[in-house]
Amino acid sequence: MTEWISHVWSEFLHVVGGTNPVLLFLAIAFLPLIGFPASPLLVAIGIRLGTATGMLFVGAAYLINFTAGYWLARRWFRAPLGRWLERRGQRLPEVAAGDETQFILLVRITPGPPLFMQTYTLGFARVHFGRYLLYSMLVQMGYTFAFLSFGQSLNSKAIWHTMLAVGLLVGVALAVNLLRKWLVARRAAELK
């Protein structure tokens, strides 16, 4: 049984390791816009390209993804969604200029919502594009580093590489959770 699992794993690494980088680039740039989860793509890029090259690669793909998602939400999807919500007695979020940074960070670091929902929410809210892109890239590249490191560790025969990468993923999740709690507490203090 373990020999079969080892063989399947080797084949998986061989297939992912042989994937054309252009396909991976297009996948991470466009598939999350339609709801495909980014994390398996990041792991695959880590396996194929490693962490350092993968960071540059994913950074360029995210520039396309975040820009396209923001403008799709702001220009094309906002009006129809706004009308649909109004018929149900609700409305799209509006954020004051002074609250944009905090709103962007909270949307990007709150666990649960997939990448496309975060991106579209920020586009619907019409936050300042430059601020949106800067903070989105900073937050997502932290996650990206952890997932790429995990992917790269899967190529290693040493289990400690994978354990270290899992520790990095847990560390990023804890840091994000602490930052989110701090931002929420800060916002609550401002509202008093």
Image (cartoon, grey):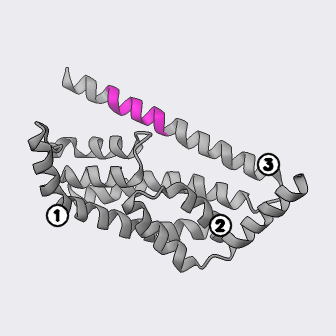
Position of 149 with respect to 132 (left or right) is right
Q: Is residue 180 magenta?
A: yes
Question: Element type at marker 3?
Answer: helix
Task: Give the Cα distance between marks 2 and 3.
Answer: 17 Å
Tell me residue 72's x, y (percent).
Answer: 24, 64
Instruction: Choose top left, top right, bottom left or bottom right for residue 181.
Output: top left
Q: Which mark is in front, 1 or 3?
A: 1
The front one of 184 and 107 is 107
> Which quadrant would residue 51 be assigned to in this image?
bottom right
Question: In the rendered image, is residue 51 in sight?
Answer: no
Q: CA distance from mark 1 to mark 2?
A: 36 Å
Q: Given this view, does label 1 or label 2 mark the residue nearer the observer?
A: 1
Residue beneath disc 1: 75
Q: How many residues crowd around disc 1 within 10 Å: few (fewer than 14), some, or many (20 or more)? A: few
Neighbor class of circle 3 (other Cα within 10 Å; few <14, some 14-19, many 20+) is: few
Residue in front for this viewpoint, 139 or 35: 35
The crowd level at tag 2 (other Cα within 10 Å; few <14, some 14-19, many 20+) is: some
Name the residue beneath numbered marker 3.
Answer: 160
At 65% from the left and 67% from the top, the residue drawn is 50
**Which stretch did the figure color magenta?**
176-185
Q: Type of residue at label 2?
A: Gly
Tell me the chief SS of the magenta region: helix
Which residue lies under the disc numbered 2? 50
Instruction: State the image coordinates of residue 88 (x, y, percent, origin top left).
Output: 13, 39
**First of labels 1, 2 by sequence position:** 2
Residue 42 appears in the picture as rendered: yes
| Residue nearest the observer in this picture, 123 or 97 | 123
